[in-house]
Image: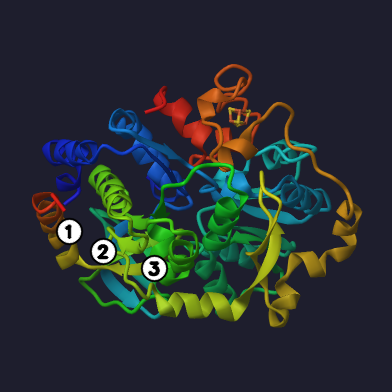
């Protein structure tokens, strides 16, 4: 199946069809895996040749995590808590240092592959453990399910979860970038379905396609957007039908909504976006690291946390510059010594572009 | 393997359900069998699920997978619209 979705001949036919429509399009996607497919297979360049420019946008949960949230985890680590975190987060610089730096300084920072891993670690030790819960709607249900299924008393959650549709709305409202269409993230959509995106097409007239991750999925997604544009339509279509149903995964949504509630939160590169964060509901207050360790975290209140100097991650995440337009890209900033999160995370645009050595 | 499977937060990988014990199932990623939590989906042995961060997040429709490619051909065929 995989190889069929990489069929070169079919890919060329789709590109030709897009070219035949003779449109100039600026599109955005919001997913590291989409970016990986676009760059790895050289699709970005092929699409540019037929008039289509695609930007990543804020589609990297690690990248949009703010310096303040990283400082919270660092402060908890320095106060003796065991920090459980996805590996991608380790080297992301906060305002003072990074979790990997804290680890070399003797703090207990452990990499987990998922929340259940973290729960298992907490069960095995007496120390207070704080799971840095990062992720969009794809990941948040797992944190919710773990909390619902009961976690040990020494297991706490520092929520950094975020919702995709409110960020899309923010991008559209900011109006910094021309947007002829949005490629919506396939795996977020397996959970939320197509309905939560609909207002963007209806209120702002922007075509949307939920696409899968193989090269043909993305090319087809672009072609479907181009056709909507040509016909003057704006609706949400699903290309990734093998995994995404219109209604999403109602069971996962229910679990997520019973544990988390939307809250206003800042994204890196963005101002506070209304209802775009996910905080634990009151009944899970005893699991909420921000409440339980309020005294420790109080010292961060009211402080400003600047972005790394010279880093354009904010602009990359808003889609207004491409990674290779950042003056530090590949010189002062590389995956070995990253300046900003977009170079650290395997889902960050700068990391992906650097890895494949080209912009498509 | 683990990096490929879990390094990307929005990455999710298809696997076949081999055995289910309560909320946990053994799932087969093309030969590599691992445990995954299946409490967020309704699935049964023999079905394909998409795994993300140790959880099955959706069942995969094999028939759709085959039909999608068919759909591609159709869309490309009638695209003078
Ligand atoms: S190349 Fe480095 S400094 Fe520039 S935007 Fe990307 S992460 Fe930031």
- Give the answer, above or below, for where B21 lies relative to A93: below
Residue that appears at 68% across and 68% down = A263
Residue that appears at 24% across and 74% down = B45
- The crowd level at tag 3 (other Cα within 10 Å; few <14, some 14-19, many 20+) is many
Image depth: mark 1 or mark 3 in front:
3
- Looking at the image, do the residues carrying marks 2 and 1 touch, with CB atoms under 8 Å apart? yes
Q: Where residue B5 sits in the image (x, y, percent)? A: 39, 49
User: What distance separates the C-alpha of mark 2 from that of mark 3?
Assistant: 11 Å
Q: Are marks 1 and 3 on the same chain?
A: no
Circle 2 sits on which residue?
A: A241
Q: How many numbered discs, if any?
A: 3
Q: Chain of mark 3?
A: A
Which residue is more in the foreground, A15 or A284?
Answer: A15
Image depth: mark 2 or mark 3 in front:
3
Circle 3 sits on which residue?
A: A194
Residue B23 in sight: no
Residue that appears at 55% across and 47% down = A58
- Looking at the image, do the residues carrying marks 1 and 3 touch, with CB atoms under 8 Å apart? no
Residue A208 in sight: yes
- The crowd level at tag 1 (other Cα within 10 Å; few <14, some 14-19, many 20+) is some
Secondary structure under tag 3 reads loop
Location of ligand 1 given as a quarter of the image: top right
Determine whether the beta carbon of the residue marked 3 sits less than 8 angstroms from the nearest atom of ligand 1. no
Seen from this angle, which residue lies furthest top? A331
Q: Where residue B41 sits in the image (x, y, percent)? A: 37, 76
Q: Where residue B53 sits in the image (x, y, percent)? A: 46, 58
Which badge, 2 or 3, comes first in the chain's sequence? Answer: 3
Circle 1 sits on which residue?
A: B68
- Place residue B48 in its image quadrant: bottom left
Q: Chain of mark 2?
A: A
């Amino acid at each position: 199946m995989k190889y069929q979705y990489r069929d070169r001949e079919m890919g060329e036919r789709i590109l030709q069809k897009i070219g035949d429509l003779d449109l100039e399009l600026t599109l955005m996607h919001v997913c590291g895996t989409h970016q990986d497919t676009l760059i790895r297979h050289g699709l970005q360049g092929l699409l540019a040749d037929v008039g289509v420019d695609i930007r990543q946008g804020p589609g990297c949960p690690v990248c949009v995590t703010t310096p303040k949230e990283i400082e919270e985890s660092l402060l908890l680590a320095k106060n003796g808590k065991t920090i459980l975190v996805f590996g991608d987060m380790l080297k992301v610089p906060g305002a003072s240092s990074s979790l990997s730096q804290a680890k070399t300084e003797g703090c207990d920072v452990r990499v987990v592959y998922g929340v259940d891993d973290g729960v298992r670690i907490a069960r095995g030790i007496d120390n207070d453990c704080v799971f840095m819960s990062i992720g969009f709607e794809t990941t948040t249900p797992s944190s919710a399910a773990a909390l619902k299924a009961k976690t040990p008393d020494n297991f706490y959650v520092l929520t950094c979860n975020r919702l995709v549709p409110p960020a899309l709305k923010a991008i559209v409202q900011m109006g910094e970038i021309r947007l002829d269409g949005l490629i919506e993230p396939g795996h977020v959509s397996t959970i939320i379905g197509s309905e939560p995106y609909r207002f963007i097409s209806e209120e702002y007239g922007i075509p949307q396609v939920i696409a899968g991750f193989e090269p043909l999925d993305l090319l087809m997604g672009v072609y479907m957007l181009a056709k909507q544009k040509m016909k003057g339509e704006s609706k949400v279509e699903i290309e990734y039908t093998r995994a995404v149903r219109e209604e999403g995964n109602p069971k996962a949504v229910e679990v997520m909504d019973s544990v988390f509630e939307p809250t206003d939160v800042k994204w890196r590169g963005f101002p506070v976006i209304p209802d775009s964060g996910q905080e634990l509901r009151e009944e899970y207050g005893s699991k909420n690291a921000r409440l339980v360790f309020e005294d420790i975290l109080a010292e961060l209140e009211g402080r400003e946390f600047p972005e790394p100097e010279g880093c354009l991650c904010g602009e990359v995440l808003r889609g207004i510059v491409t990674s290779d337009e950042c003056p530090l890209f590949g010189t002062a900033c590389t995956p070995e010594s990253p300046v900003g999160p977009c170079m650290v995370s395997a889902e960050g645009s700068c990391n992906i572009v650097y890895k494949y050595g080209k912009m498509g | 393997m683990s990096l490929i499977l879990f390094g990307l937060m929005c990455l999710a990988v298809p696997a076949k359900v081999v055995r289910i014990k309560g909320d946990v199932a053994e799932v087969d990623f093309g030969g590599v069998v691992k445990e995954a939590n299946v409490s967020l989906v309704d699935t049964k042995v023999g079905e394909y699920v998409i795994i993300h961060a140790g959880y099955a997040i959706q069942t995969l429709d094999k028939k759709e997978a085959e039909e999608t490619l068919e759909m591609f051909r159709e869309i490309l065929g009638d695209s003078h619209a």
